[in-house]
Amino acid sequence: MVSKLSAADKKRLKELQTELKTLQAGLVLTKKREGKDPYITVTVVKNQGRLQKLADQEVKETLVGKFFIELTVTAKQQAVFVPLSVASGKKTAGFMYYIEGTAPGLVSRADIQVRGDEVSQVTLGTLLFAKIPAGATASFAIQATIRGTQSKRYKLVFSRPNYKLHLTDTRYMQYLKEIHSTSVLLS
């Protein structure tokens, strides 16, 4: 014989189910921040930063930080689409970054290239994507130049590489583990 739940028990059960959903969503978010994404694996292969002195037309020296990061992205369960763009958050891009430094800095140039077996480039309107089939790995080479203040330290932080599971998706999935470049002192 199955007894009926009282109104108070039904209410408590509903509250527990809501709490469980909230905790499960929090667990997924925490795992993503640790780099445990259900759809992609991201690995830093090369991470370099260096100081470069540039002479401009007025024969005065300009100091810039040059950064090079090479990442591999592996599609786990299904094909993923990664936008081939780098941006500081003004618009959604494949690799979202910010500058961490002891003074304000500016990325004056950023470039991204992709290569890999079975990896293809797909265009949707004006956006270019790298299509990574399930089980395949793509290598992304990102170069950036930061102009900053002399005697200050800078590094580039990729806060969230974005990707889509289908080109027609309106929203991007996000890999939430931050990727930090080597730090460079402009002196």
Image (tube, rainbow, N blue to C red):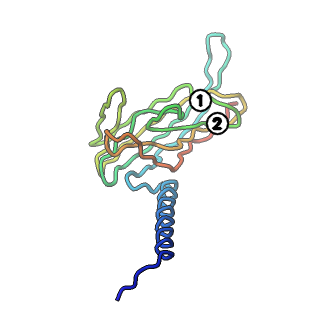
Secondary structure under badge 1?
strand
Q: Left or right of 93: which side holds 106?
A: right
* Position of 72 relative to 68 (above/below): below
The residue lying at 44 percent from left, 44 percent from top is 71
Check if mark 2's residue and mark 1's residue have beta carbons within 8 Å: yes
Q: What residue lies at 43% left-to-right and 49% top-to-bottom?
A: 42
14 in relation to 95, above or below: below
- Give, as a three-letter code, the residue at label 1: Ile
Q: Check the image and report above or below for 120 versus 33.
A: above
- Residue drawn 67% across and 19% down? 61
Task: State the count of labels.
Answer: 2
Q: Secondary structure at mark 2?
A: strand
Left or right: 81, with 13 as reference point: left
Name the residue beneath numbered marker 1: 146
In this view, the residue farthest toward the front is: 7
Give whichever of discs 2 and 1 has the lower sequence position: 1
Q: Nearer the viewer, residue 1 or 67?
A: 1
Q: Position of residue 32 (x, y in %)?
A: 48, 54
Disc 2: CA contacts within 10 A as few (<14), some (14-19) or many (>=20)? many
Q: Which of the two residues, 40 or 117, is positioned nearer the viewer here?
A: 40
Q: x%, y% of residue 134?
A: 29, 50
Q: Residue at x 50, y 32 (%)?
A: 87
Give, as a three-letter code, the residue at label 2: Tyr
How far apart, in angstroms, are the residues tagged by discs 2 and 1? 8 Å
Q: Nearer the viewer, residue 32 or 46?
A: 32
Q: Which residue is mark 2?
A: 154
Q: Residues within 10 Å of mark 1 (few under 14, many from 20)?
A: many
Q: Position of residue 174 (x, y in %)?
A: 45, 46
Numbered tag placed on residue 95 in the rendering: none
